[in-house]
Image (cartoon, rainbow, N blue to C red):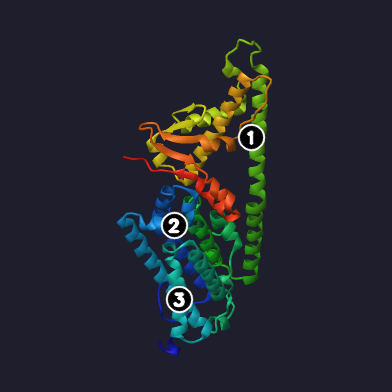
Amino acid sequence: MEDNKLEINEKLFSFEGVIGRHAFLLNMVIICAISTVVMFPYSTYTYSHIKEFGDFFNISKIFYDAPLLLKLWILTGTAFVSVLSISNIYRRLNDMFGEVRKHTNLALCSISAIGAFSFLYPLIYIILFLCLSLILFAYLFFQKGKITGVLPYDYKKEFNWGAFFGTWIWGLFNKSYIPLFELLLWLTPLGFYFQMYCGLKGNEWAYKNKGCTDVDEFNKSQRTHATVFSILSLVILPVVYFIVIFALIIALVFAVAADSKNAPADPAAPAQNKTSFVESFLDGIVSLYFERYEITENENKFYVLNSDWKSSDFKDKKDMLDLAASKASEVRNKQFKAKHPNGYNYFTKTDELPRTKIYSAETDQLLGEFNMDEEAMNRSFKDAIGAIFKAYRFYNVEE
């Protein structure tokens, strides 16, 4: 490629020409969205196959154990995303240097290429490549180009905060209907990327669709929109959410108080009528997760359906085990109080975790437990932290 061919080229994929900071960021947002779609099957597979907390630090093992078709999809998709990224980095470097420096370009592009496949490496290398990629991106974005940097200022390429925060509402005010897609995407991982896309394209859309002729008037109206939607998103909506949640809590407290006031005072009344609201709520949650449970002297057994266990990720399984331990502590406290009315002993969730286990309701197979390595806890602080992370252990259902 000759120097006289260093013309502006804002395409998503091309190794010809140069690309400015605005178009570079816009393309990278699109590439990140594509990467999210590509990695979604792998992310779902990873979370469903994490058996203990320590597996979060050994993601590469889960990848190597994944089905062949999934590995091919991820490797092919990652290679595709990597090539798209490198093409934009290459043109951005051409703009910054004002000439083609192939060896320098390829050396810097290799950081992006290696980082794209970081899920194949141990955790320390993932962190290293992530840091290098962030430094490279900051360098590419904040450094002015020798070619695009001398072009006349274009206000249509300013970031539009009104379009970012307001998306589809801002779009209706500015006769721009592309932001309406946010209604479909805002609850998905692509929602944020689309917000960024709207922010980067907002000025261009508004200027074109509203047919503005006065630049000062246009900038003033967009600043007003930015202020209004920023306050709405960052101040008013959080306050409204807080008020609604607070109101629900107050209503719940009054409902519990009214229920307690109207509860029968007859000592012979059914025990269920005397159960506290918190205990009733916990019983309801436990019944949603578990088919049954048995609290014995040495073990707390909770039984779950195989289908529910298979569909749960690591966090869900951890929450189930914690919930089971909480319920076990409540039962043990009641049992102790019944046997020793004047005695005192308090069982906590932490006390019950080591003897709480989750079993298959169909086959009695052990599915989850909390197994702390006591020797590691006594060796060093680092080993103790590792032991805590690895204490939650979950097993796949045997077919």
Residues at marks 3 and 2 touching, judged by CB atoms closer than 8 Å: no
Q: Earlier in the sequence, mark 3 or mark 2?
A: 2
Name the residue nearer the viewer: 242 or 85: 85
Crowd band around label 1 with a 10 angstrom C-alpha radius: few (<14), some (14–19), many (20+): few
As drawn, 392 above or below 150: above
| Mark 2 or 1: the one toward you | 2
Q: Residue at x 54, y 57 (%)?
A: 171
Residues at marks 3 and 1 touching, judged by CB atoms closer than 8 Å: no
As drawn, 6 above or below 367: below
Q: CA distance from mark 3 to mark 1?
A: 53 Å
Q: Residue at x 53, y 62 (%)?
A: 196
Q: Residue at x 61, y 23 (%)?
A: 336
Residue 205, visible in the rendered structure: no
Q: Which mark is residue 248?
A: 1
Crowd band around label 3 with a 10 angstrom C-alpha radius: few (<14), some (14–19), many (20+): many
- Under mark 1, the amino acid is Leu
Left/right of residue 345 with respect to residue 210 in the rendered view:
right
Q: Which mark is residue 109?
A: 3
Q: Which mark is residue 59?
A: 2
Q: Which type of secondary structure does the marked residue at label 1 adopt?
A: helix
Q: CA distance from mark 2 to mark 1?
A: 41 Å
Left/right of residue 199 with respect to residue 366 in the rendered view:
right
- Under mark 2, the amino acid is Ile
